[in-house]
Image (spheres, rainbow, N blue to C red):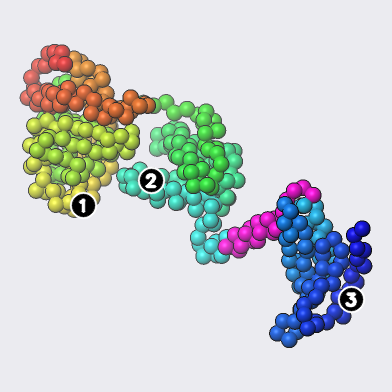
Amino acid sequence: MPKLVTPLTDPALRNAKAKDKPYKLSDGGGLYLLVKTVHKETVKYWRLDYRFNEKRLTLAFGKYPDVSLVVARSKRAEAMALLMTGTDPSDTRRAERVEQIEQREAVKREANGLPVVDSFEAVALEWFDAKIKPLSASHSGRSLAYLNNDLIPYLGKLPMAEIKAPALLECLRRIEARKNKQGKPVTETANRVREQMGQLWRYAIATGRAERDIAADLRGALEAHVQKNFSHITDPKLLGQLMRDVEGYSGAPVTVAALRLLPLVFVRPGEFRAARWQDINLETSEWRYFSSKTKIDHIVPLASQVVDQLRALQPLTGMGDYVFGVRAGQRPLSETTINQALKALGYSSDIIHPHGFRHTAATMLAELGWDENTIDRQLSHLVQGVKGVYQKAKYIDDRRRMMQAWADHIDQLKKGAIIIPLRTA
């Protein structure tokens, strides 16, 4: 039969004095007061002994009289309730302490102007530095602006793991409601930000700050963006006239070189402007680089005309990193430079957009009889799955012939010759 314990009283607790050795005053149910001498003074500690998973454990409740008898008994009752549910009170206590420390740290970081750990702001900026900042300056600049202007002011302090899809949708709706300079909704921007938030949430999942991608829940929630082709030229005579006008352009030498070469290689303008000398081999007539758009390595066979123009450009920018660079090749051309140069020649964006040279080349090469697969691979269109992984150099011999034929074709157009389509591959 268990030994009966007389419950403690406040007078007994107040009058308890330290002895030669520490001793206990029991209140029953595992609760007791440990009385001992510390620095020649009597100190009294509340303790609770209990068993969990067949182990004897002890929980501290603080000092008496800071923690009264009533409070100590209520803490015992809370601990017993947790044990009844199969929970170790010590685990709960540790979790509470961690939470308190995190709260204090959060207050301190906020006072110092720093984002709270694992908040949306902290995770988003970490993701930006790791995944977006290394990309092109224009892309990273836009992405950071979306974070700072459209997302962090509303979600910044919220724990990443606690943000729900409706909160993110509200931010995207604000973007969607904006109008561009033509007074039209910026649906493309809203959908682009939703896609980026999917990347952010997948990063948060991978780093243990979220459990699921809430951006995926918002597919179809925004107005669909209807993709329009960039303006392009399909009239051979007009393309020939444009190339003649480029030859007479009196702008900066690097800009002139860019205008001459972009139609010949027809890569994405952002990848074109970021071309680096280290990726170009003039001896083998190849430009190899990693496409940030498709996440695959891309090979651009260089026609003899392209090689000649690059050799002429090398003395201007060859000491720097960028082929089409300013400040001796240390920085790439800005995003608007080629646009402005085309406008200066009388070709506004509704006639030809720098990206439109890709469509121009694809259309005319198909009319000349080149195989669709060869054209697609040269355009670096993404091929899904395992098939795409093993097609990096697919059709490379045909692509070399095609790129030389394309440069020769443009030369003929520039001279004003009449070109008769002829299947060449």
Q: Position of residue 314 (x, y in %)?
A: 11, 45
The region drawn magenta spans 84-105
Q: Position of residue 353 (x, y in %)?
A: 27, 32
Task: Give whichever of discs 2 and 3 has the lower sequence position.
Answer: 3
Q: x and y percent of residue 198 in the render?
A: 48, 38
Residue 266, image quadrant? top left
Asked whether, in this view, residue 107 is left or right of residue 46, the answer is left
Task: State the mark number for residue 12.
Answer: 3
Query: Separation of disc 2 and disc 3 at Cα?
Result: 67 Å
CA gap between label 1 and label 2 equals: 21 Å
In percent of width and height, residue 148 lies at 46, 50
Amino acid type, label 3: Ala
* Residue nearest the observer in this picture, 324 or 400: 400
Disc 3 crowd, CA 10 A, few/some/many (<14, 14-19, 20+):
few
Picture quadrant where residue 288 is located:
top left
- Side (left or right) of 103 relative to 413: right
Q: Amino acid at mark 1?
A: Gln
Helix, strand or loop for the magenta stretch, by majority? helix
The residue to which callout 2 is attached is: 132
Magenta span includes 103: yes
What residue is disc 1 on? Answer: 330
Residue located at (11% from left, 16% from top): 419
Question: Does residue 36 lie above or below 187 as drawn?
Answer: below
At 82% from the left and 57% from the top, the residue drawn is 77
Q: Residue at x 62, y 59 (%)?
A: 98
Residue 326 appears anywhere in the view? no
Question: In which image quadrant can residue 362 be found?
Answer: top left
Residue at the location (80% across, 82% down)? Answer: 19
